[in-house]
Amino acid sequence: MDAVPPGARGTLPVTVIGPIVCEPNIHRVVSRGLFNGENPIHFPLTIIIFQVSLLTLFSAIFHVLFRPLRFPKFASDIMGGVFMGPSFLAYNEVINKALFLPKSVMNLDVYENLGLLFLNFLLGVKIDVSAIQKSGHVALVMGFLAFLFPFITNYIMGIFKNEIKSVVFANKSSSDQESMQSVGFLQSVIFFQVTYDILKELKLLNSELGRLAISCAMISSILSWGNGLIFKFLWLAKSGLMQAVLWTIVSGIMLVIIICYIFRPMMLWMIKETPEGTSPKESYICVLILMVLGTAMFCQTAGLPGTTGAALLGFVVPAGSTLALALVEKLEAFVLAVLVPSFVVNIGRKVDIHLITMWGFWQVELAFLAGMIGKVLGCIVPSFIYNVPFVDALVVGLLLSCQGLLDIHFFSASLQYGIATPESFSIIVSMSIVHLAVVVPWVSRLYDPSRRYVTYRKRTIQHAKSKTELRILTCIIQEEDVLSMINVLEASNASRESQIGVYVLDLVDLAGRALPMLIPHRLNRMPSNKSSRTNRIIRAFHQYEVRNEGLVSVQCFTSIAPFSTIHEDICSMALEKITSLVIIPFHVDDGNVARKMVENVVENSPCSVGILVDRGKLKESRSTGTSWFNLKICVIFMGGSDDREALAYGTRMAEHPNVSLTVINIFDAENVSMDTVEAKHDMAAIHDFKLATIQNSRVVYKEEGVASAEGMTIALGRVEGSGVFDLIMVGRRHDDSCALVSGLFEWCEMKELGVVGDMLLSPDFKSNASVLVIQQQASMGDQEEKPNNDNDNSESLNERNIKSIDSKQDQQQFASGAMIGITSPTQRDIESCTNNS
């Protein structure tokens, strides 16, 4: 055993099996304990536990150290495995013998293949094969050329580098051309899982570039799997085993028939027998695991890789189904926590950087670079034909050139078949890590998806032109959000002069599949499963459209993506559909991921955002199709762009015949100077509101001056304590230097809702009124708006009116429950308006 080079230990079955047979206690895998005279480290179970634990520790350390570089988790795992191997820790002969006993090497080999078996099965489960048909010509061409071009670039390099000998390769009699073709074959391999993990780490999974990269990687993965089988058949044929090749092909065809015509119908029956919202029976999961093991056994018997059968079986599992979700949930944790670490330890055991020579390094490095250049060119060349931005094509090429666990397993197989030596294998694995360290920061710097959401047009309700269509994007997280959203849309007052275009986006967390999807639906074409969540949502909005025929148009979509990046779909749709408002539900008991999604939407949205917190009032039985639909809405106005947007939205709602609106203007009684630009904008907004509602008897305007944040809190308490409002609207952002909110920011628990929104939802305020927090378009709301010269006189008049308000008298009347009518001279003719509160 000592005669075998450290990097090659365990690669030859003869050198492994011999010592294991001669070792004592081979019939037992568990030690009786140190106190009974047995060293636990000499027993297979103990050594496996020790190896996995040690790798997990080193992987966590590397992940923390390289987190600034946004290293994917699998890269840290590989580094941990290499660190445990003869390159570093096991370079010491004593540690090497303790960590990699012959019996433990055999166990690692078994765990490695078992882990890869289930890893490929889960990968197949997550991939939606039907999505390849929808990927488009761009992804098809890019994926094919990214797979093909590395062969070409390596072949060209072989022509110009005739002096490259077979120093790095095990078969020293092979020609230079054959050697470069072998390297080209290794470098052309692309695995979908690697691209997926990197995009997930960079939070680009469901960005426009991420969808393109995943589609390309999926196509290249299938080509790589097929090419691997062809390579094995050619290797067998070259060895004179043509009969074995033919029988293997026949067995493969039989396997496909069994999977497609026996196993898949069984899966569809299992899904049909599983009620919606429940998990499949444990017996179903056991049957599927037996299918995986059975197909692997069949493949091993027929001479096919066991991972091939597992991947094919995973492909036929309906993506996104309850069955797929249950399989991922039950298997993935164990595979990633136990089997994959064993595989990584086994890989690290074969990597020995001390074997690397300068000459060998440059030969493999040139082939490595040629493969990377081929993949990048394979993405850039089609970009000129299909008008894909150059930077996007470059980033996709860099992503596809990255290599991960499955690539390294492929390289390990090449080591077994004699294509590469331990030296070349060590170089390839080392360069894979270095390549990730260079490419991932480049990608994050070259591509910033938030840039595309910046718009220089005002997409707000306040600045929307009159008598034009108002476009609103409504998001659905839970099915219970539908009724509250429809009631808010109904209150938005669709009319012949100003129709409403509604875009419904059903947000589904990515589970049971790896490919994020954006699915459009037709209202007049219901999904096949009539009891599904999607169908019920579509039906509800279809009925809303029918009740408002000619006034409302509805389009429904489903976004399936991780909640950590699903805001990309929301912002992209808002940008594409030119919406003025995005309404997204917010649940107080939501987890951190859902709350982070809301925060991301608020930060990146290309238009105004409304965060709706329904506490029951909007979910009450109030059919929008009946004449008694009635909402009592309150707008709290404290100044600022967000409050102006809330006021503009409330003004539009006030035009609905069944909506009563109360506007409460809370201002600083000790600082009534209106010299600032923001104050002038606020007065202009109030003036426009008064003009728009001058003849509306269902509108009440009140003003209250307060002296401090405590007074503002008391005023808000009276608003909620009245219990007459169904919906309270307020702006999200307020100047922290303002005396009304000074000192309250540090007490804010839900920063997504702003200070006032957080206070309205505080347990200290006893109310069940729903809250709609409005943020005006961030990209424009932060810019200074030019005041309208036509309103200069009216602004001065309103300014004088506010200065003349007796704040103490107003506070007394408001505290006693009396309504303060519209006191502006331009509004005195409607002082007889009724008190709807």
Image (tube, rainbow, N blue to C red):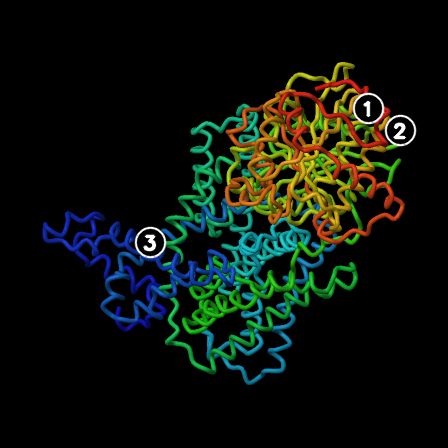
Q: Which residue lies furthest to the left in this view?
A: 36
Amino acid type, label 1: Asn
Of tags 1 and 3, the one toward the viewer is 1
Which residue in the structure is indicated by mark 3?
52
Q: Which of 804 and 136 is in front in this view?
A: 804
- What residue is rendered at 28% in x and 56% in y? 104
Question: Relative to 691, is 444 above or below?
Answer: below
- What residue is rendered at 45% in x and 33% in y? 285
Which residue in the structure is indicated by mark 1?
548
In the rendered view, does 344 fall on the left or right side of 182?
left
Quarter of the image containing the C terminus?
top right
Which residue in the structure is indicated by mark 2?
496
Disc 2 element: loop
Q: Which of marks 1 and 3 is nearer the N terminus?
A: 3
Estimate the spatial distance between the alpha carbons at disc 3 and disc 2, rounded to whole Å: 68 Å
**Residue 421 location (% of width, % of height):** 43, 72
